[in-house]
Image (spheres, rainbow, N blue to C red):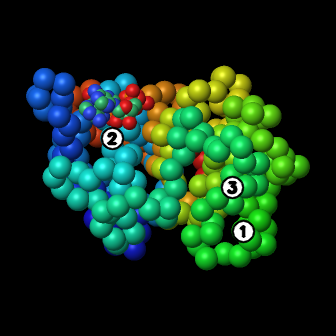
Amino acid sequence: MNKVQDVANQVDNMTHQFKGNRNDTVTAISNLSLSIKKGEFFVIVGPSGCGKSTLLDLLAGLQLPSQGRIVVNGERVSNPSLTRGFVFQQYALLPWRTTIENVAIGLEELGLKRKERLVKAASYIELVGLKGFEETYPHQLSGGMKQRVAIARSLAYDPEVLLMDEPFGALDAQTRESLQLELLEIWRKTNKTIVFITHSIDEAIVLGQRVGVMSQRPGRISHIVDTPLFET
Ligand code: ADP
Ligand code: ADP
């Protein structure tokens, strides 16, 4: 059993069901328990439809589980919060805002003045390797660069955990590979807990310190693998 202070995310015996089209019940998550350590890079891998996105939404507090509970850093998750940074496949940048404005969005909620927000945003833009692109609009950036802006935006809130839903799924193979290496570099520099979902076993092995394997049925993690290739 992990000591409480070492655990970032604790999921106890969680089940989540949806109402299907014909009023039937779809069980997306079934009696799932999971413990993710602070600072860990945890990857969840599994085929389409096995419940990965649902699990991540539940960790984010975007949905509440039908049964069971989730605790993040000692607090029960009951609502969405910027302290759980979310990175989506489709970037979700505001098209009429520059890079620096996109990253600075939301920092107001942390109570920072405009000057402080811009300084902070600029430092995260530098962290993701986009120094010089502060005044650029999303349509002027490649897919990989847009995703780096999205990562900078999530990290700028200083989230307790970074939740990433197939963030590199829309990128070409070469861009995906360089973003994977950059993300590992960012993880090492920031010591963030990262929960990353993918349907690619290759990606899971490259990125994960531990990899949770989800199977199609019954919506739970069937086993957890310590990746032998991982060097810290
Ligand atoms: P994955 O991310 O692994 O592709 P999902 O979490 O998206 O899987 O979906 C898991 C299962 O739950 C699937 O059978 C999917 O059709 C179902 N599901 C997901 N979201 C909903 C929803 N909002 N309403 C009904 N069924 C859903
Ligand atoms: P992914 O494989 O990337 O998770 P999906 O197509 O499974 O993509 O899901 C995309 C979104 O649609 C998710 O937010 C999920 O909750 C929702 N969704 C998936 N299946 C269903 C469904 N049967 N009915 C309603 N919403 C669904």
Left or right relative to 117: residue 223:
left
Quarter assignment of residue 172: top right
In the picture, the disc for residue 102 is none
Which numbered disc, 1 or 2, marks the residue that appears first in the sequence?
2
Give x and y (percent) for residue 27.
18, 35
The reply to whether callout 1 and callout 2 are in contact (CB within 8 Å) is: no
Type of amino acid at the residue the image marks with label 3? Val
**Is residue 169 or residue 200 the one in the foreground?**
169
**Is residue 43 or residue 161 the one in the foreground?**
161
Where is 92 relative to 117, above or below?
above
The residue pinned by badge 2 equals 54
The residue pinned by badge 1 equals 117
Which numbered disc, 2 or 3, marks the residue that appears first in the sequence?
2
- Residue at left offset 62%, top offset 69%: 108
Q: Residues within 10 Å of mark 2 (few under 14, many from 20)?
A: some
- Residue at left offset 37%, top offset 25%: 48
- Residue at left offset 68%, top offset 55%: 103
Q: Looking at mark 2, is its residue's CB closer than 8 Å to ligand 1? A: yes
Q: Quadrant of the N terminus?
A: bottom left
Q: Looking at mark 1, is its residue's CB closer than 8 Å to ligand 2? A: no
Q: Secondary structure at mark 3?
A: helix
Q: Is residue 28 visible?
A: yes
Give x and y (percent) for residue 92.
58, 41
Type of amino acid at the residue the image marks with label 2? Thr
Give x and y (percent) for residue 140.
80, 34
Q: CA distance from mark 1 to mark 2?
A: 32 Å
The residue pinned by badge 3 equals 103
Left or right relative to 76: residue 128:
right
Left or right relative to 197: residue 103:
right
Q: Secondary structure at mark 1?
A: helix
Q: CA distance from mark 3 to mark 1?
A: 9 Å
Which numbered disc, 3 or 1, marks the residue that appears first in the sequence?
3
